[in-house]
Amino acid sequence: MNLDEVITGVVLAGGKARRMGGADKGLLELDGKPLWRHVTDALAPQLATVVISANRHLDIYQASGLKVIPDSIADFPGPLAGMLSVFQQVAGDWFLFCPCDNPCIPHTLVDRLAAQRHGAPVVWVHDGERDHPTIALINRAVEPQLTAYLQAGERRVMIFMRQVGGHAVDFSDCKEAFVNVNTPEELAKWQKRP
């Protein structure tokens, strides 16, 4: 893949956020800025275009001027549904997906994923201890398999990504960049950091 190919960034903000008490996680503030904005600010210098995958408070996200893509499948079926909806509604071949609750993604994310792709249609972050399959560079070519996978009732992201020939990329040198905010307690800890 040539790094000059257009890659569209996608902030995944369409979940139910059960561990956040159902609050729209992307709209929760950290350092006076919504979580989704931290992610778009980190992605914007790395990508030509950034869009938001969201299912609630669409007007708030749309006020940013960014394109907002709701899921085409009802009932919050998970991040794969958001990915499929983006494939269905946004032109382009390559997409960098990142959840709205990862406010500190590195400025080298896109380049490193692209450089380590080695022909795979999907690559995702591994922080040295765990996989982060929703922080992934994905080619539109997987859309037919993704459609069939979701129609079969499957929702597990890692299983799908491995089935289509994807692999992890090592980011153990910046593990802290992939700590996400899942609970009110974690958000409070982030607020108190120096």
Image (cartoon, grey):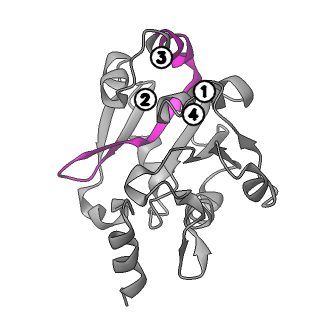
| 41 horizontally vs 179: left or right | right
User: Mark 1 — residue?
Assistant: 74
Numbered disc in front, either 2 or 4: 4
- How crowded is the residue under tag 1: few (<14 C-alpha within 10 Å), some, or many (20+)? few
Residue type, mark 4 in image = Gly
Residue type, mark 3 in image = Leu
Is there a contact, CB below 8 Å, between mark 2 and mark 4?
A: no
Cα separation between marks 4 and 1:
11 Å
User: Mark 4 — residue?
Assistant: 82
- Residue 26, image x and y in percent? 56, 59
N-term-proximal mark, 4 vs 3: 4
Q: Residue at x 50, y 46 (%)?
A: 16
- How crowded is the residue under tag 2: few (<14 C-alpha within 10 Å), some, or many (20+)? many
Numbered disc in front, either 1 or 2: 1
Label 4: state its secondary structure. helix
Look at the image and tell me whether residue 91 can be seen. Answer: no
